[in-house]
Structures are given as structure tokens and as C-alpha cells.
Image (tube, helix red, strand yellow):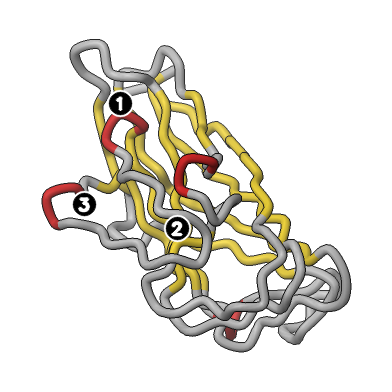
Amino acid sequence: MNTRIQHFSGTFSTPADDTQYTIGDEVASSATAGSVVRAVFPLGGKRWFNVLRAYMSIVPAAGSLVITACDLALLVYKTDEVIAAIGDNKALVVPSTSRILAAKFNFVNGAWTQPTGAVTAGTSGYQEVLSAVGTRGNGFEFVGGETESVTAVVQAIATWNAGAQVQAFTIGLDIESPR
């Protein structure tokens, strides 16, 4: 089968909050569930897709990115199956019945690089990872009029004190699909 790999990216910024994230907290654009805007990646015209790789960058509004315990999971869902937003810095319970992930990527504190390439705190952090599920990524098919897009959910997988400042997130996905 003839396929191609396309790159998609989306952004959001967290509110300035000095409360540390705990394991399982949602990392989101608003503390209010109804105001959360997640990164959505339109895949119009794709019958199926594999999410092969993801990247994430974090840029704090001021100062350095706190990378100690900056362990995050990127959960990618078909948009029609995404779990409800809870709000920034609130426990995000993922029911087993809703855990239909298109992909899962773990970003860990020992692998964030700053603009100079060093793995230390810096003005920003960047990390790129392969799919956490398999070497060919995570395949899904759109059927029966489903919205042809995927939605990203970010969840803390360690206790992280991001500091009382806005954090700008950029999320990128490399997706394989038919030509």
C-alpha cells in the first residue's frame, strides 16, 4: 500500500498557577473544565492512520523551564472518543471504558533538551518520542461518519512544580496515512 507521513502540530498554554501537578492531573489551557481548549489535529480524508512519533516543546513565559519531575503523558484520541476535560491541575480519571487511545507517548524529565542541546533547565524544553505502544505506531480507522481528527490530552505522570507562570506547549504528531 502506498502511504505518506504527514506532520501536524497544535498549541495551548497553561494558566499561571503555583500549585504543583500531581500524578494523574490534566495539564490544560484552563482550570475550568468548560473552558479547556485542547490541541486538535484535522485528518480530513484519511480512512485510517498510524501515529508514529510525537514531539512536545514547553516554553515558560519567564525564567527557566523546571524539568525536575517534568514527566508527562500525551494521550491521543480520535476526537469523537476523547475523554471529557477536567481542567488544569485537576485529577484526570481515565475510565477503562474510555481508554480507546489512538496513541500514548511518555515524555520524561531526563530527556528534555534546551535550545543549546543540554539536558538541564533552560528557557525552553523539547523532546521527541516514538509511539509507546508499538513500532508501527497506533493504527485507527475512521468509520461511519466519525469526525476525521484526533485530539491531544496531556496528563502529569509525576509530581511536577511548573512554577507560577504560563507554560506554552506545542505538540506535534507524525502520522502515516494512505496517499
Mark count: 3
The spot of residue 75 in percent (x, y) is: 39, 54
Quarter location, residue 82: top left
- The amino acid beneath tag 2 is Leu
Quarter location, residue 167: bottom right
- The amino acid beneath tag 3 is Arg
Figure quadrant of the N terminus: top left
Whole-angstrom CA distance, mark 2 to mark 1, is: 20 Å
Q: Which residue is drawn at 33% across and 56% down?
A: 135
- Secondary structure beneath disc 3? loop
Whole-angstrom CA distance, mark 3 to mark 2, is: 13 Å
Q: Name the residue under label 1.
A: 48
Q: Name the residue under label 2.
A: 74
- Please name which of the two marks, 1 or 3, marks the residue nearer to the observer: 3
At label 1, counting other C-alpha atoms closer than 10 Å, the crowd grade (few under 14, some 14-19, many 20 or more) is: some
- Pointer 1 and pointer 3: residues touching (CB < 8 Å)? no
Dot 1 or dot 3: first in sequence order is: 1
Q: Residue at x 48, y 52 (%)?
A: 53
Please state if 138 lies on the left or on the right of 26 as rendered. Answer: left
Q: Judge whether 62 appears above or below 69 on screen.
A: above
Q: Which residue is drawn at 28% across and 48% down?
A: 101
- Secondary structure beneath disc 2? strand
Kindly identify which numbered label has been placed on residue 99. 3
Work out whether residue 176 or residue 80 is closer to the camera in this orientation and state it: 80
Dot 3 or dot 2: first in sequence order is: 2
